[in-house]
């Protein structure tokens, strides 16, 4: 079987594995205070052109989201996000478990706009009963979004501007950020993210690490005591250097970017194939997730050789499915799939 | 430098590392539903003689404690524990962050007794204002304790009996459980733990894995929906199989026990040396943590070659320190240390 | 000025005040264990034909909602409710502050249907990733709803049936329940509510008491330890008898019903007047809240003599406003308003 | 029976009741924005010589404590308090339910010292693993304490000084504050409290109101958004003016002080009687709670005519009991009790 169901179905990049093997016998202090973490943090600060940022390594995405959000918000504040946002849909109420309401906004292609944020802020503060409602305190986005789309730099700048005007913390979930950075149409860089957000994270789990997310905090108020919050939320890994070793490896010599570029190249080839085959798309994703609309019998035929996700019901005859390419997708895999798609 | 400061200063057992390398390219489903996790869970159920237990793999100890305790307690219930308990002292209020009070009991050598638990229960329910106080709902112990001591089977049976009589969930934190199982004086087995507790965990992080804790749940009520709770607390690893691969490796062919046996053998040798050198101990630990009381100049001299923790102030001249042996302590390390201790 | 802005702008029914005066010097135990609370609870159990119900008195609505919901749900469960529901909109995230997600469903006239609940349940459990989503554990309704509409007995029976089939706790917020009970078109009685729900509350604050809500719990599992939950949420009034005295007064000799009947009679008269004047309504409420759509200059003219709430924007020329009648609305007030509406 | 079991067994001061009766028909806005609350707040600000303080009215003590503490603390911070503190013992874990650990310090006569606070702060910050422990963020005291003792002005000044040096919010629970203010040996005034604390509350429930506590917030950071927090914790009374009417009454013409003076006069008479009768005291309280140590047969005899609380076990023959005087204790009651005590 060929695997296109997600970007976390196998282990890690060979270089990452090798680094873990090489450093296995080293002795270091725990909890992320080791030289590997320090060096990885420094590499990331450089990549972000953010010498004053705090870089903190956590194990997974839900943990990172709940830790960041619970650190930033006051008890009566909530977090604005697209209604399709991961924190709103797929984290078993982790944010609410820390006491905060998620305030969903209608989303188009997984995105929200600066105007929507401004309107939500106005709606809250112009209501004389605002104290009876959850106060917007933060904006949560993901880059790429749940359906693989991208915010443009102009869009992100507009959002950042509203957030700063309205004293809203801006947080970007970058679980698949590497695939955004590698997409040809992308114009948002790591320095842009560090400059425009208060905090964002660079995902590792889905981009070639065994696990790990690197939180980049620009806002000094969020930096203070952030480690207390990580520990309290169960996110402080005893052998924290495992995160430093992995991120240190991919943030050296452009590996993070290159590994993700493979996924984008494969995805681009897939998109061209689908276009050639006249197969419509459910969402216009320029990154590593592709959502073709297929007839049910086509889906069944492909299932014999490929693993992929059913994404959404379209009509009686058709469903949208999701193919995910990744850092590990091979020439053989993509060749087989494109050939079979053309032959459907 | 020789490292005796803790049992999580280096990577993992070579067999564990090899298993991670070997399986790195495999494709599996995520979130712990893969065959590696299933097989590891089955091996653990067998080792525990608990065919109906649910075995769930989490990444770290604080995460495990908060997830288990928040799953078991009703909002107005708290957890009885030794005042020296990890959840009471060293988890940045993770338990309280889930809404529950930790109810500390005075502890002797890190332990509490069945009588203390019964007395606490009686004290609560005999007070006519009990609704104004936190209701005891659970008992938390660790085996070995924070200072390396062990509950005997008789002690654990008495505690289990009180807990069942009083409808208190019994939970044992086994962060260093392997070192208890390998100690000659220990008489509490894995099947005993599965039989006498409602839930306990077998620590991996400190006993030769890169990370990971295996929760063994006997109580059917706690099994239902436990995975929701894991996800909500940020403990569901995307590449969950990493936990299955590691635990599957150490729970085959007795590796878990053998690896920990090395630590105990080294610790025993150290204990004999200290006795021979006339150096008193701060706590009588039969496991891999040893707490000699040393003069300040002795401590300074040892610091030149060894890394170890300052544990407690004793008097003007002396402090207690902690030496930790582990699955990875070598003959060379222990030989050097014993020689230097005798020469102090 | 004549006051129609809400039903909690003045004090309490004269009989309630007199009872408070008469009993002021009595000495009783605190925290709701006194004979006044016992008697009031017994009167309510009788009115509900629910001899086994637990009746508990709390001070206000938000407090009641958060206490009931936090008592009933497991940590990973959420509460389904109309998107216009009070807990979703107007309680500053009180439910989320206890760790639970509010799961809003699109509402028609403030109501949701049995079908919507069944669909939401199916959607959750049919998704193979359901552990990544909040589990529906409860249904929250209000009778009357936020816009004064009523569930029919048939609707409530259908909802109750789904809830029992799907193991969802059914909770009805009766902040204005008295006005529902007094509406001619209503066919849901107190015994129906006790029989069909697991828990509901009979509002006092908006129906002639100084303050107070009476929670009626049919579900035995919710009864146990409910008082712990009340105390923990800060809802246990020291001089708890104040609640017993008030509810004991209105649940004797039909006062609760009669006081609310006055509001309904006044509201009916207002509705007839609006119809005669050709003024359209924004929502079809048969209870004490009326939502005429008025031109902006009409609103301005009425504001000179009347206090009322602006409810919703309709179009350039018109807004919907809210007039609330209550237990205390006088003949003089309603006569003045009807005359002025006819003369607009 | 004569009632000495607590100071909340009967209703309210006749002047308070009269004010509630007189204002019953008035129409005002809700939720504490009415002129009665504004005027009461102004009277309290004047009594505190604190023109910039925010005065907010809540219904009860537990609600007030949890609201204030949850507003002030960051998620990973806890509140230092005497181990006998109300929040540590008698609030069913309300503080922990908001996510915060209560950090108890050994208390002498219900009190803690500036030195203890400084030591706790030092212990936290000097530990290199401090991020693994709950950070002290606040100090909670009560005046008078749980056993009726008082902090002197010098003690409170020392505590305030440490708190300001160490950035700890200082909060004083004044559930029975009126009885402290009226005690001859007291030297801490309302202006002192407003000056030395960040926030404190003036209890009404136990000093002659039906219910109500007035929170006085000096710290500007705590003032902002405090009403959101009150609403979220279910503490915003719909007919909020009931609190304003009551506090406005007692803070005019010295009624608060005078009413409490009655309790102190009665208590002083009781203390003199006990001394004359050679009956020892369990705690040296100069306020309205008195703790004689009586033989069990004496207790039984007194129980025939008097209601009072059993406080603590002393020895085989003797228990400590508590007699509470209050704003409502009459000459007849105290005369009877003193006579019977002398005749024991």
Image (spheres, coloured by chain):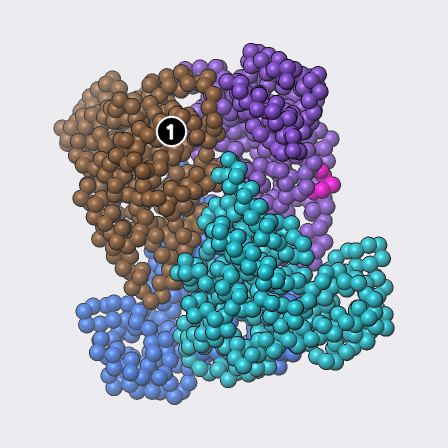
Chain colours: A brown, B purple, C blue, D cyan
Residue B303, placed above or below residue A222: above
Where does label 1 land, which residue?
A38
Most foreground residue, B336 or A5: B336
Most foreground residue, D86 or C309: D86
Q: Residue at x 63, y 52 (%)?
A: D83
Q: Quick check: is D258 in the magenta stretch?
A: no
Q: Tell me: D76 left or right of A142.
A: right
Q: Where's the C terminus of chain B, which quadrant?
A: top right
Tell me where the magenta segment starts and ends, as one range.
B113-117
Residue B249, placed above or below residue D295: above
**Residue A82: image location, x then y, percent:** 29, 47
Q: Residue at x 21, y 45 (%)?
A: A157
Residue B262 seen: no
| Snapshot quadrant of residue B88 | top right
Q: Residue at x 46, y 24 (%)?
A: A28
| Snapshot quadrant of residue D209 | bottom right
Q: Tell me: D318 left or right of B136.
A: right
Q: Tell me: A291 left or right of C307.
A: left
**Residue C335: image location, x then y, percent:** 35, 87
Which chain does tag 1 point to? Answer: A
**Residue C94: image location, x then y, percent:** 45, 57
- Circle 1 sits in a helix, a strand or a loop, which is it? helix
Most foreground residue, B72 or A219: A219
Mark 1, other Cα within 10 Å: few <14 / some 14–19 / many ≥20: some
The secondary structure that most of the magenta stretch takes on is helix
Residue C179, placed above or below residue B170: below
């Amino acid at each position: 079987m060929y695997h296109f169901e997600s970007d976390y179905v196998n282990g890690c990049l060979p270089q990452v594995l090798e680094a873990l093997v090489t450093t296995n016998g080293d002795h270091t202090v725990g909890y992320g205070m080791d030289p590997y973490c320090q060096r990885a943090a420094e590499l990331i600060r450089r990549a972000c052109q953010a010498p004053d940022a705090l870089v903190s390594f956590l194990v997974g995405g839900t943990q990172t989201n709940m830790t960041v959000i619970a650190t930033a918000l006051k008890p009566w504040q909530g977090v604005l996000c697209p209604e399709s946002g991961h924190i709103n849909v797929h984290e078993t109420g982790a944010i609410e478990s820390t006491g905060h309401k998620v305030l969903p906004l209608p989303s188009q292609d997984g995105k929200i706009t600066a105007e929507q944020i401004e309107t939500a802020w106005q709606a809250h503060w112009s209501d004389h009963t605002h104290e009876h409602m959850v106060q917007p305190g933060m904006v949560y986005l993901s880059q790429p979004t749940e359906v693989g789309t991208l915010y443009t730099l102009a869009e992100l700048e507009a959002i950042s501007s509203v957030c700063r005007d309205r004293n809203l913390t801006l947080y970007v979930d970058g679980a698949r950020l590497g695939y955004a950075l590698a997409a040809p149409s992308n114009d948002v860089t790591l320095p842009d993210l560090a400059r425009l957000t208060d905090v964002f994270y660079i995902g590792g789990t889905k981009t070639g690490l065994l696990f790990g997310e690197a939180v980049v905090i620009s806002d000094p108020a969020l930096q203070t005591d952030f480690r207390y919050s990580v520990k309290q939320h169960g996110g402080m890994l005893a052998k924290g250097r495992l995160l430093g070793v992995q991120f240190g490896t991919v943030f050296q010599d452009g590996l993070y970017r290159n590994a993700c570029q493979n996924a984008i190249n494969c995805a681009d080839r897939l998109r061209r194939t689908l276009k050639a085959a006249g197969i419509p798309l459910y969402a216009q994703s320029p990154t590593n997730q592709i959502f073709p609309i297929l007839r049910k019998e086509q889906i069944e035929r492909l299932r014999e050789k490929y693993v992929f996700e059913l994404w959404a019901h379209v009509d009686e005859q058709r469903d949208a499915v999701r193919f995910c390419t990744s850092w590990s997708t091979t020439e053989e895999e993509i060749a087989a799939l494109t050939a079979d798609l053309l032959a459907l």
